[in-house]
Image (spheres, helix red, strand yellow):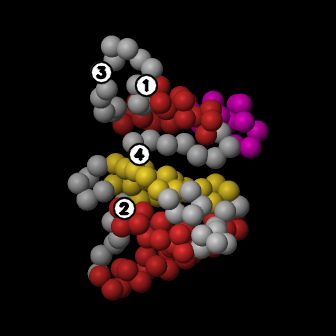
Amino acid sequence: SENAVLAMNGFAADGVSLVKRLGQRMEWYKHAHDKEMSTPALAQMLSNTLYYRRFFPYYTFSLLGGVDEKGQGVVYSFDPVGSYKPELYRAGGSAAALIQPFLDNQVGFKNQQGVEKQLLPLDTVIRIARDAFTSATERDIYT
């Protein structure tokens, strides 16, 4: 949607099928309500869709990022059976073990004493994201 983006890793064919299904359901919502689905509503719909297939799940691990009704950024991480939780930041995929500690340090300010937690400016966030992906591509052959 205009306010959200979905990233997936896992089995590519399941990811394509899931995206197609979500697109259909978002269209139905738009026609029924004359508005786009909010990011939290999209997260709940994705959770329900994944849970519905829990006995023969889509083999995908999903990250849904977007803007909520208050204008705040939010990231939702999903497992293949629909369990999800909102987070401030999250990495997924084969390089998640490399990127997540970096994000914990640079964005979450974890394991740092005397550092005031603050919102980061956009240019800093872009630089951190670029550094994280550059580092991952140098060390993880699957990225």
Query: Tag 3 or tag 1, which sits nearer the N-term?
Result: 1
Query: Of the residues shown, which amino acid type is indicated by label 3?
Result: Glu
Disc 2 residue crowd, few under 14, some 14–19, many 20+, Cα 10 Å: many
The stretch in magenta equals 132-143
Instruction: Look at the numbered disc 4 and give the secondary structure of its residue.
Output: strand
Tell me whether circle 4 and circle 1 mark residues in contact (CB < 8 Å): no
Q: Which mark is residue 87?
A: 4
Q: Quadrant of the C terminus?
A: top right
Q: Residue at x 41, y 17 (%)?
A: 112
Front residue (pair 49, 54): 54
Dot 1: what SS?
loop
Q: Residue furthest right?
A: 141
Inter-mark Cα distance, 4 to 1 = 15 Å
Up the image or down, 36 lies above or below 111; here it is: below
Establish if 39 lies above or below 117. Answer: below
Residue 9 part of the magenta-drawn span: no
Residue that carries the numbered disc 1 in the rendered image: 110
* Left or right: residue 143 compared with residue 47: right
Q: Is residue 16 something that shows in the picture? A: no
